[in-house]
């Protein structure tokens, strides 16, 4: 130890720890509470340098005056996961006689166990307790192993950490609005119990056609059967009946809010008002939900007329496309019109006719 000491060697001291053992060498004993104890060297004590302390009295001390519970781990500031352990410590060894004096509020079906090392603490597993705060109480009159009883009650608190929602993902139209066909994708910190998933999820307002709730491992998806309604604010609530496969319940209800975009194009080629637009290439309009293909040919028109094929791509049913047979005329203004007969695959119509123009450039 001296090799790590940089101060005055004359100030160097050593600390000795004396375990309390009985005549059989067992550490399952303790000082009598409240009784003065005198520590006596019955023979010379010698350090590694040959310095000695002669036999005699080394000092006296008085242990605590009465038996008591000391502290709880975790305490008020700490959390324990469901399936974790809490420990209650005392200032003297205890046996099973102390267990009836220990209670938890709100009640939990805990099985308290004596700590094997020195019997100065008890511990219990936290099973499928719901998340929240709990108080551990030790009533006055609780006995230690020597028969001493506590004169004052003890109380401390701990929190049970529940199932946690880690992230939510919804593809966005922009920072505030969402597509109509999107699913709500949630990830939790544990694998979910499928039997609790469906009943734990609700959505307001009701989605026309309903939603499907699907889960695998720690993931939960909420999928509209057709689509969410356009320009509508939704709130998804996942309540505390959701639990993991190992019995851990959701810590608190989670609410996810989003607003869908209106049923209208959000992407144009060429863009509205464009000048010098290319004379070749398709006209493309992209919508936030799948389209009813049959309604497209009735709703779409362009002036002056052009030769081409109007279609909705099978691999991209969100688009209206006009593939030209030749090219646009140079330096010509074209006007595209879509009337309110256009509808989505879920039956939503444009709220108002759409009209925009673009002008081509030269060859």
Image (spheres, rainbow, N blue to C red):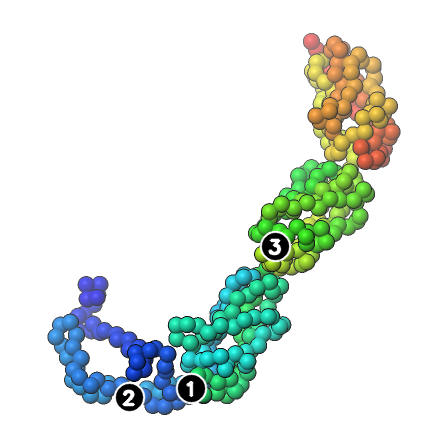
| Residue 188: numbered disc | none
Q: Are marks 2 and 1 in contact (CB under 8 Å)?
A: no
Identify the residue under disc 1.
146
Of the image marks 2 and 3, the number of the one nearer the N terminus: 2
* Pointer 2 or 1: first along the chain: 2
Observer-side mark, 2 or 1, equals 1
Q: Up-down: is 209 above or below 45?
A: above
Q: CA distance from mark 2 to mark 3?
A: 56 Å
Residue 199 % position (x, y):
72, 54
Residue 222, placed above or below residue 237: above
Q: Residue at x 79, y 19 (%)?
A: 310
Q: CA distance from mark 3 to mark 1?
A: 44 Å
Q: Is residue 35 left or right of residue 104?
A: left
Label 3 CA crowd tier, 10 Å (few <14, some 14–19, many 20+): many
* Viewer-proximal residue among 11 and 254: 254
Query: Circle 1 — which element?
Result: loop
Identify the secondary structure beneath mark 3: loop
Residue 247 showing in the rendered view = yes
- Mark 3, residue position: 244
**Res 172 quadrant in image:** top right
Question: Could you classify mark 2 by the number of other residues whose Cα lies within 10 Å: few (under 14), some (14-19), or many (20 or more)?
Answer: few
Q: Relative to residue 38, is residue 342 drawn left or right?
A: right
Asked if one can make out residue 361 in the rendered structure from this viewpoint, the answer is no
Q: Which labelled disc corresponds to residue 38?
A: 2
């Amino acid at each position: 130890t001296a090799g790590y000491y940089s101060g005055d060697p004359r100030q160097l001291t050593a600390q000795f720890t004396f375990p309390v053992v009985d005549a059989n060498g067992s550490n399952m004993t303790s000082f009598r509470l409240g009784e003065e104890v005198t520590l006596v060297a019955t023979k010379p004590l010698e350090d590694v340098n040959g310095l000695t302390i002669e036999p005699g009295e080394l000092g006296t001390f008085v242990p605590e005056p009465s038996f008591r519970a000391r502290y709880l781990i975790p305490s008020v500031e700490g959390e324990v996961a469901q399936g974790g352990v809490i420990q209650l410590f005392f200032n003297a060894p205890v046996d099973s006689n102390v267990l009836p004096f220990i209670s938890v509020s709100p009640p939990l079906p805990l099985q308290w166990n004596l700590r094997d090392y020195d019997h100065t603490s008890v511990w219990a597993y936290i099973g499928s307790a719901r998340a929240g705060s709990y108080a551990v109480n030790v009533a006055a009159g609780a006995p230690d192993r020597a028969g001493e009883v506590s004169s004052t009650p003890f109380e401390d608190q701990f929190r049970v950490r529940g199932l946690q929602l880690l992230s939510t993902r919804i593809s966005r139209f922009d920072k505030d609005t969402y597509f109509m066909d999107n699913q709500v994708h949630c990830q939790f910190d544990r694998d979910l119990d499928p039997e609790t998933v469906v009943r734990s999820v609700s959505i307001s307002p009701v989605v026309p056609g309903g939603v499907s709730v699907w889960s695998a491992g720690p993931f939960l998806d909420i999928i509209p059967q057709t689509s969410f309604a356009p320009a509508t604010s939704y709130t998804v609530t996942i309540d505390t009946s959701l639990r993991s496969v190992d019995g851990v319940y959701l810590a608190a209800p989670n609410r996810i809010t989003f607003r869908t975009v209106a049923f209208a194009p959000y992407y144009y080629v060429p863009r509205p008002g464009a000048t010098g637009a290319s004379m070749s290439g398709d006209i493309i309009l992209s919508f936030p939900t799948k389209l009813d293909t049959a309604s497209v040919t009735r709703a779409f028109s362009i002036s002056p007329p052009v030769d081409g094929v109007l279609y909705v791509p099978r691999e991209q049913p969100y688009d209206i496309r006009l593939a030209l047979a030749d090219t646009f005329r140079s330096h010509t203004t074209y006007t595209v019109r879509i009337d309110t007969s256009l509808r989505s695959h879920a039956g939503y119509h444009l709220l108002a006719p759409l009209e925009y123009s673009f002008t081509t450039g030269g060859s």
